[in-house]
Image (cartoon, grey):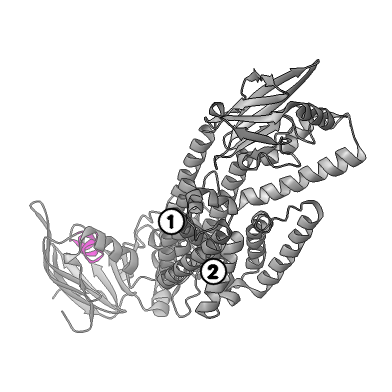
């Protein structure tokens, strides 16, 4: 339960910290607000797709995904045209509902991994968790919103303190799992990936001489966590610099009736205060970069397991469960009549197992390695989240049906060889 | 302290070691008055001016300026007092040689609050130097340098202007220009002026003259004629 509240708490803070600068810009009635809020909602709603689709088990990618994307974008344009401030000006109940809905959409379902143990609690079934967290996120966001508004009255200088706090949160808690960029990046990457795979490779230019592994590696860059990290750093850095620049250089109050030296005196005080208040932001940037560097430096390299021969008895391949208890990827080799096929097996975080061919439907059979919580395609570099291994389709390794009995996972070798041949035909 | 005094000195004494520069000086200056302090070399004129401007602390006595007893001020408070209430003009100008005229004026703005080039240019225009804005001090005549000094002294609208031999380095014609200009600016802005000089001709521009000898005020005269011994 603590995990759930922890998660909702942070989501509430995130949401509030997104809303506050936007509301401030709205109050300032800057044209820039329209652009920024559009961008902000665009980024925020990019989270909308994966959780939304997953919730309703709609595994649709190519066309409907884009339509949904375009539709969301249209909604964003309307919302930003109306102005966020106008929306949140309404009464408290409306705000709470609004924030809860937004929290629901912004809430990445992947975050639920943090509270797996909650699944054990009968009344907290997984299907209710997003709604529960959305409500908790909305409530905490609402409380923070009111507190911050009451305390700081939306003074731009105070926004800095919030931004500073936010950077600390990001630096400490979300450096590798920030909430906006990876989703957007994943969306762009998947669209690109699917477009190239399905349209260019399969339909237009099969066996094209220039669509080599180097080309795939370029696309794979979009999928890398390092890219996420760089994009996050760039976002926070440039947004911080923008806020600093905007606050320091925005015009001073006119002060009619003041003599020139008196006016300069007041302006000097304002300027000094602005610089002082921006110092924590500079420090935060430094701290953020420190964390980023640490995160980058601690990134583990690819784990490529050694290929072990697999014994076959009664046409069944048998893998000992105890071998998989380390949670790492295991690879097995089956040799039959000059045919060699590779099998991968892994124990997932929910204690279930996956047994698959070491190849997907799309790429040549270079196989997979493990990169932290992902499998990593050695051909195109696509990361496959471990908890989706065992599901069919796309870049996932081709799953094999298996039985778990007497401490072993057993599967039909003939069928595995047949599938291997079929999948690799024409590659 | 006289009721309408802007500056009031009460038995001010200043000793440098054994040497007495001021000996129990009593003096009052009204707001908006132009007072000239005359006296021979070594009579204590500059010490008196420095004490009124908060540059030097008296050994004894009290100095009140604009309702504040500056003898009780800390160094920080004195700095604030000088920055916000006092403008200084010196015989040697003390312009920064590698800054242009407008930059010299802006330096005073910077030390006070924020530099404002347009305001500094306007100040130089008021002292007739709109054609010398970008000139270095070495490219200006003595009279022009002193006018830059006046613009610099007045840029922060001080309540009190202290001038120590402001025309000491100028010929009669340039001295007249500078003093006429000071009189015009004082009329416009109604600041109080204390000019120290040994030149009776300069004293004619003042409204009142006191004569200082051996650290004591020994004569006083209102109007444009020189002071007589009491």
Q: Position of residue B59 (x, y in %)?
A: 11, 60
The answer to whether marks 2 and 1 mark residues whose Cβ atoms lie closer than 8 Å is no
Q: Chain of mark 2?
A: A
The location of residue A356, given as percent across then percent down, is 69, 33
> Which residue reaches farthest left?
B18
Q: Between residues B80 and B227, which one lies in front from this camera angle?
A: B80
Q: Is residue B88 magenta?
A: no
In the image, the segment drawn in magenta is B44-56
Measuring from the top left, give residue A309's x and y in whole percent. 66, 17
Main secondary structure type of the part rendered in magenta = helix
- Of marks 2 and 1, which one's residue comes earlier in the chain? 1
User: In this view of the protein, can residue A167 be seen by the observer?
Assistant: no
Whether residue A291 sits left or right of residue A130 in the image: it is left
Q: Which mark is residue B29?
A: none
Residue at figure coordinates x 54%, y 35% from the top left: A296
Query: Label 1's element?
Result: loop
Q: Is residue B54 magenta?
A: yes
- Looking at the image, which is closer to me, A228 or A339? A339
- Can you identify the residue that label 1 sits on? A1
Q: Which residue is mark 2?
A: A24
Q: Quadrant of residue A304?
A: top right
- In this rendering, is residue B98 above or below A36? above
Q: Which part of the image, by quadrant, shows the N terminus of chain A?
A: bottom left
């Amino acid at each position: 339960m603590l995990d759930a509240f922890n998660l909702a708490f942070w989501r509430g803070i995130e949401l509030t910290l997104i809303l506050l600068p936007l509301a401030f810009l709205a109050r300032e009635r800057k044209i820039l607000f329209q652009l920024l809020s559009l961008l902000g909602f665009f980024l925020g709603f990019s989270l909308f797709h994966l959780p939304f689709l997953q919730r309703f088990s709609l595994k649709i990618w190519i066309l409907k995904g884009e339509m949904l994307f375009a539709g969301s974008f249209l909604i964003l344009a309307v919302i930003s045209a109306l102005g966020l401030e106008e929306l949140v000006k309404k009464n408290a109940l409306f705000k709470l509902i609004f924030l809860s809905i937004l929290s629901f959409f912004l809430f990445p379902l992947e975050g639920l991994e943090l509270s797996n143990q909650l699944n054990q609690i009968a009344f907290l079934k997984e299907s209710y968790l997003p709604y529960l967290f959305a409500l908790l996120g909305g409530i905490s966001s609402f409380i923070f919103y009111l507190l911050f508004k009451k305390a700081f009255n939306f003074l731009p200088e105070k926004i800095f303190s919030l931004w500073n706090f936010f950077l600390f949160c990001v630096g400490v808690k979300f450096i590798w799992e920030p909430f906006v960029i990876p989703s957007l990046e994943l969306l762009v990457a998947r669209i690109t990936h699917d477009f190239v795979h399905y349209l260019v490779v399969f339909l237009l230019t099969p066996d094209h001489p220039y669509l080599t592994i180097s080309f795939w590696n370029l696309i794979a860059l979009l999928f890398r966590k390092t890219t996420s990290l760089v994009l996050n750093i760039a976002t926070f850095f440039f947004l911080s610099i923008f806020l600093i620049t905007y606050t320091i250089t925005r015009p001073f109050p006119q002060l009619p009736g003041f003599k020139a030296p008196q006016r300069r005196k007041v302006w000097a005080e304002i300027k000094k205060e602005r610089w002082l208040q921006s110092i924590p932001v500079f420090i935060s940037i430094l701290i953020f970069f420190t964390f980023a560097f640490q995160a980058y430096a601690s990134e583990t390299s690819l784990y490529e397991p050694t290929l072990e021969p697999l014994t076959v008895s009664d046409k069944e391949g048998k893998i000992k469960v105890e071998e998989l208890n380390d949670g790492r990827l295991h690879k097995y080799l089956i040799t039959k009549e000059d045919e060699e096929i590779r099998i991968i097996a892994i124990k997932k975080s929910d204690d279930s197992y996956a047994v698959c061919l070491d190849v997907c439907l799309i790429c040549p059979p270079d196989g997979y390695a493990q990169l932290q919580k992902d499998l990593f395609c050695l051909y195109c570099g696509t990361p496959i989240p471990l908890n989706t291994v065992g599901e069919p389709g796309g870049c996932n390794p081709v799953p094999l049906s298996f039985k778990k009995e007497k401490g072993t996972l057993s599967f039909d070798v003939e069928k595995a060889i047949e599938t291997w041949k079929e999948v690799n035909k024409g590659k | 302290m006289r009721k309408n005094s802007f500056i009031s000195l009460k038995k001010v004494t200043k000793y440098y070691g054994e040497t007495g520069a001021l000996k129990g000086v009593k003096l009052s200056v009204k707001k908006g008055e132009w007072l000239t302090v005359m006296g021979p070399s070594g009579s204590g004129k500059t010490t008196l001016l420095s004490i009124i401007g908060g540059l030097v602390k008296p050994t004894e006595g009290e100095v009140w300026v604009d309702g504040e007893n500056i003898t009780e001020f800390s160094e920080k408070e004195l700095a604030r007092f000088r920055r916000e209430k006092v403008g200084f003009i010196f015989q040697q100008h003390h312009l920064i040689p590698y800054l242009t005229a407008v930059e010299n004026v802006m330096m005073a703005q910077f030390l006070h609050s924020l530099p404002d080039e347009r305001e500094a240019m306007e100040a130089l225009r008021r002292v007739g130097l709109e054609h010398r804005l970008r000139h270095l001090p070495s490219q200006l005549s003595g009279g022009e340098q002193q006018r830059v000094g006046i613009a610099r002294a007045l840029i922060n609208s001080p309540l009190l202007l202290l001038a120590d031999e402001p025309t000491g380095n100028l010929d009669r014609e340039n001295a007249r220009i500078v003093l006429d200009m000071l009189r015009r600016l004082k009329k416009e802005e109604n600041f109080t002026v204390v000019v120290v000089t040994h030149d009776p001709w300069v004293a004619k521009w003042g409204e009142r003259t006191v004569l200082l000898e051996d650290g004591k005020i020994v004569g006083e005269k209102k109007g444009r004629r020189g002071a007589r011994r009491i």
